[in-house]
Image: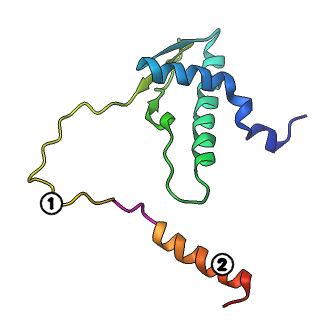
Amino acid sequence: MRTKSQVNRLGMFDDVRQVLDAALQSGGGSFELPSHGVAVHWRQRAYKFRKLYAQTLATDDSFSMSPYDRLTMPRIADDSSTVVINVREIVGTFTPNREPTEVSEVPVPGDELFDVAADIARKIKEGNL
C-alpha cells in the first residue's frame, strides 16, 4: 500500500524526468505510449513531477523557477496515445523605448515581506521580541 509521502518523492518520477530532459535538450518532441489512457496518466505524472521539482528548488515560499517550466504538453486527442512536448521559446523581438540607464535587479514579489516575517519569527524564537 502506498502512503501519501511516497507519491511526492521525486525518485518516483525518474522515468518522466528522463523524457522531459530529452525534450528540453532537443527542443521538444513527442512520446508515444501504448494507449490513450496510459498517455493521459503519463502526462498527469509529468505535470506532477514539474510541480514537485519546482517546490524542491524553493527553500521557502518564495518564487522559484525550474527548467521544466518551459515545457508544455497540450491536451491529448481522444484517438491518440502520443504526448506532445513543446518547449516555450522567445519568438518575438523586444525593442526598448530608450537605452537602459542602470541595470537593476527586479525584486521577486513577496521577498521583502517574507524577510520581515522570518526576522520576526527568529526574534520570537530567540526570546528577543
Give the quarter of the figure containing the C terminus: bottom right
Q: Could you tell me which residue is drawn at 73 percent across and 88 percent down?
A: 127
Q: Quadrant of residue 86?
A: top left
Q: Nearer the viewer, residue 129 or 35?
A: 129
Give the quarter of the figure containing the N terminus: top right
> What SS does tag 1 mark?
loop
- Please, what is the three-letter code of the amino acid marked with disc 1? Thr
Q: Which residue is identified by label 1? A: 101
Q: Could you tell me which residue is drawn at 45 percent across and 30 percent down?
A: 72
- Please, what is the three-letter code of the amino acid marked with disc 2? Ala
Q: Quadrant of residue 18?
A: top right
Q: Which residue is identified by label 2? A: 121
> What SS does tag 2 mark?
helix
Residue placed farthest to the left in the image? Answer: 98
Q: Earlier in the sequence, mark 1 or mark 2?
A: 1
- Disc 2 residue crowd, few under 14, some 14–19, many 20+, Cα 10 Å: few
User: Where residue 60 sits in the image (x, y, percent)?
Assistant: 60, 59
Would you place residue 25 above or below residue 96 in this image?
A: above
Would you place residue 102 above or below residue 66 in this image?
A: below
Q: Which residues are magenta?
A: 106-110
- Residue 120 numbered mark, or none: none
User: Where residue 112 sits in the image (x, y, percent)?
Assistant: 46, 71
Q: Could you tell me which residue is drawn at 41 percent across and 27 percent down?
A: 87
Instruction: Report the colour scheme.
Output: rainbow
